[in-house]
């Protein structure tokens, strides 16, 4: 018979967030947030709960064996009553196999994921799996385990994760981002909790972290923020501030298209409109691998009903690295062959990054053009531009090696930056806002044919003294 101390040891009252996760009926669930918020505990409790169904079979995994043994597995056995797997009750803990068998016939295998083979995973038939610190695991492991949820005699099968925020990774794209924009599938569930939400932490734990951690680590590892991390290039970006619902963009605004061409990587094109106050709205994107003819056709189709004032392209595409009809040929000329006449963009990376940061920065004295509130940036992104949003959250500086020169110039990491490059080209073009023609009712703000054409390739040439911007007398912008 158990003593009172033994009974109280296994009497656990989960927090509200832990309960949401443990009792979620969604097929896939994720518990994220700050250090010490109880996510590993919640994952182990859910595993024990699912093992109450007779002859269930589940997997608990973590990247390395030492972490699995010293943290996740240790937490599991601290929470699981020994009588569940006691030999005298018909259970067993086979340490050599990292497998525990419950008295009701349910089994749990513990596996580290750094050296586990795909073949081993593909041989499994399981009713559930739990991955602890899942941000350390690749999405392929998750997808394989998802395909192993086929234990036929179990009425419902589940996959669940515990993780710390890791910006731009597969967990963010699969669980967090769809939750934020309201498009998450009914099969998925996401819950997050801060460090402060765990009432069982030692009294000095939180004060010590607050005193020792820099601001970005507090936001990421205590508050559970996904979009704040050390080395982030655009910490100014905030979805609630910069991402807006699409609206009908006036044709009279200036329109710019910027292209970052990819040879092996995706080609990205961004469409921007500039309003009368110089605010920039990125309203569409193209993000696909392929060849120039495919890119050009798709980009022109998206631009069919607008008058583009300026086409910009990665200046490296001007290099004549190809051959056509026995002559040296460039990617830029290939785009021209398919109807896109773009000028080389300004590719000064650090200057461009700084200018983008200025456009993202909220000016407390500027009125927001979308909601009339005080405090506004100059750059807004339509919610349909998913790839741009994803890249801007994970764009980061290269990490210098420990023996590198301390004052070496900062450079962005050359990875998943196609939309970032196109955005820089656009903001560095230093476009003017469209000219206001007339404020009388019924008179267009910009008369037809008066839209500024900054593209020196596509605008017509005229004799000296004539308007180079397409028709009529010279207005205030042509004289600048």
Image (spheres, rainbow, N blue to C red):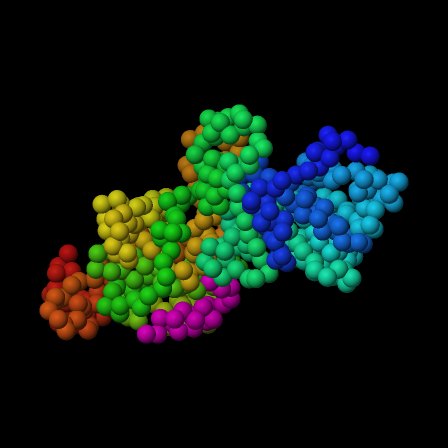
- Residue 160 position, x and y percent, is 64, 51
Q: Residue 353: within the magenta?
A: no
Q: Nearer the viewer, residue 424 or 242?
A: 242
Quadrant housing residue 38: top right
Q: Nearer the viewer, residue 202 or 407?
A: 202
**Left or right of 100: which side holds 184?**
left
Quadrant into which the N terminus falls = top right
- Residue 152 position, x and y percent, is 77, 63
Residue 286 appears in the picture as rendered? yes
Q: How many marks?
A: 0
Q: Nearer the viewer, residue 13 or 382?
A: 13
Write the residue at 55% across / 52% down.
190
Q: Nearer the viewer, residue 97 or 415?
A: 97
Compared with 416, 295 (above or below) is below
Write the residue at 32% across / 59% down.
281
- Residue 384 position, x and y percent, is 42, 63
**Left or right of 388: which side holds 115?**
right
Residue 337 appears in the picture as rendered? no
Write the residue at 67% across / 47% down.
46
Quadrant into which the C terminus falls = bottom left
Compared with 200, 279 (above or below) is below
Write the residue at 49% across / 45% down.
226
Quadrant housing residue 89: top right
Compared with 127, 205 (above or below) is above
Compared with 174, 200 (above or below) is above
Range of magenta residues: 287-305
- Residue 82 position, x and y percent, is 79, 38
């Amino acid at each position: 018979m158990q003593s009172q101390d033994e009974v109280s040891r296994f009497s656990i009252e989960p927090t509200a967030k832990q309960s949401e996760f443990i009792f979620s009926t969604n097929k896939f669930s994720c518990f994220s947030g700050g250090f010490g918020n109880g996510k590993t505990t919640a994952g182990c409790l859910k595993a024990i709960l699912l093992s109450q169904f007779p002859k269930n079979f589940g997997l608990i995994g973590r990247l390395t064996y030492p972490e699995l043994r010293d943290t996740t597995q240790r937490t599991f056995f601290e929470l699981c009553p020994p009588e569940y797997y006691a030999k005298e009750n018909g259970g067993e803990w086979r340490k050599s196999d990292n497998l525990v068998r419950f008295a009701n016939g349910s089994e749990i295998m513990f596996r580290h994921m750094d050296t586990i083979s795909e073949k081993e995973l593909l041989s499994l038939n399981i009713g559930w799996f739990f991955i602890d610190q899942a941000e350390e695991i690749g999405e392929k492991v998750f997808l394989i385990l998802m395909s192993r949820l086929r234990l036929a005699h179990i009425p419902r099968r589940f996959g669940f994760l515990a993780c710390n925020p890791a910006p731009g990774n597969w967990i963010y794209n699969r669980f967090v981002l769809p939750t934020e924009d309201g498009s998450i599938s009914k099969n998925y569930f996401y819950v997050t909790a801060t460090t402060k939400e765990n009432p069982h932490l030692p009294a000095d734990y939180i004060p010590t972290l607050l005193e020792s951690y820099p601001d970005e680590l507090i936001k990421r590892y205590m508050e559970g923020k996904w979009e704040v991390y050390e080395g982030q290039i655009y910490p100014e970006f905030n979805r609630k501030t910069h991402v807006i619902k699409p609206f009908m963009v006036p044709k009279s605004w200036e329109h710019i298209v910027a292209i970052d061409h990819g040879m092996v990587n995706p080609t990205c094109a961004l469409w921007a409109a500039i309003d009368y106050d110089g605010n920039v709205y990125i309203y569409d994107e193209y993000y696909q691998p392929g060849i120039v003819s495919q890119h050009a056709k798709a980009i022109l189709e998206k631009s069919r009903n607008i008058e583009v004032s300026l086409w910009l392209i990665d200046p490296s595409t001007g290099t004549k690295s190809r051959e056509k009809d026995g002559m040296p040929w460039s990617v830029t000329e290939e785009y021209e062959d398919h109807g896109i006449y773009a000028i080389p963009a300004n590719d000064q990376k650090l200057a461009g990054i700084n200018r983008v940061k200025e456009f993202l920065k909220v000016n407390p004295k500027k009125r927001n053009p979308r909601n009339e509130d005080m405090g506004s940036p100059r750059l807004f992104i339509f919610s349909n531009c998913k790839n741009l949003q994803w890249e801007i959250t994970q764009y980061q500086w290269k990490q210098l090696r420990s023996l590198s020169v301390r004052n070496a110039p900062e450079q962005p990491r050359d990875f998943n930056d196609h939309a970032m490059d196109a955005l820089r080209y656009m903001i560095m073009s230093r476009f003017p806002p469209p000219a206001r023609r007339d404020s009388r009712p019924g008179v267009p703000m910009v008369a037809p044919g008066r839209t500024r054409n900054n593209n020196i390739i596509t605008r017509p040439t005229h004799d000296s003294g004539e308007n180079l911007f397409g028709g009529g007398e010279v207005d205030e912008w042509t004289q600048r």
